[in-house]
Image: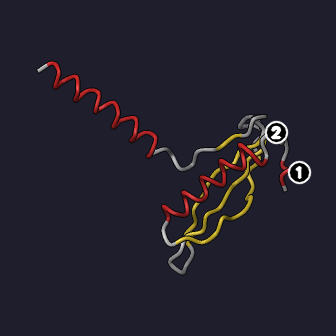
Amino acid sequence: MKIIISILQKASDVLAHCSAVLGQNDNDWFTNRTGHLSFRPEVIRNGKGQFTARIACRTGCSSRDWKVQGFGTCGQWRSARQAMKAARIMARDLALYRYRFSDDAKNVA
């Protein structure tokens, strides 16, 4: 009986971890290495039954000096899930690779 309970607890832990990873908040900001520049994926529904994947850019280190502006779009998609996936990949790549050491929005735009 203890073995079954142990297996069920481990399975529960694995499922909880997978749920947390897959169900991350879609409004998470991806911050670059300097900590001054962040990117967030967004999805907007257009009137034609498609979804636009967008990226928002935030500059500053704390909530007192944050400035948020639109950065760009990643295309049109048939489902919100596909659009969010594309936007998350683009936001992550912008923060980790393209603008890894950038400090300010004037360097971005």
Write the residue at 33% across / 30% down.
13
Q: Residue furthest top?
A: 2
Q: Position of residue 90 (x, y in %)?
A: 66, 55
- Which residue in the protein does label 1 denote? 106
Q: Quadrant of residue 72?
A: bottom right
Number of marks drawn: 2
Residue plotted at (55% across, 70% down)? 77
> Observer-nearest residue: 64 or 40?
40
Q: Earlier in the sequence, mark 1 or mark 2?
A: 2
Which residue is at the front of the view, 47 or 83? 83
Is there a contact, CB below 8 Å, between mark 1 and mark 2? no
Is disc 2 surrounded by few (<14), some (14 to 19) or many (20+) residues within 10 Å? Answer: some
The spot of residue 93 in percent (x, y) is: 68, 49
The numbered mark at residue 94 is none
Q: Amino acid at mark 2?
A: Phe
Q: Is residue 79 above or below residue 12?
A: below
- The numbered disc on residue 101 is 2
In percent of width and height, residue 98 lies at 77, 49
Q: Amino acid at mark 1?
A: Lys
In the picture as drawn, the residue positioned furthest to the bottom comes out as 48
Label 1, secondary structure: give it.
helix
Q: Position of residue 35 (x, y in %)?
A: 75, 35
Marks 1/2: CA distance?
Answer: 13 Å
- The quadrant in which the N terminus is found is top left
Near mark 1 (Cα within 10 A), the count class, few <14, some 14-19 or many ≥20, is: few
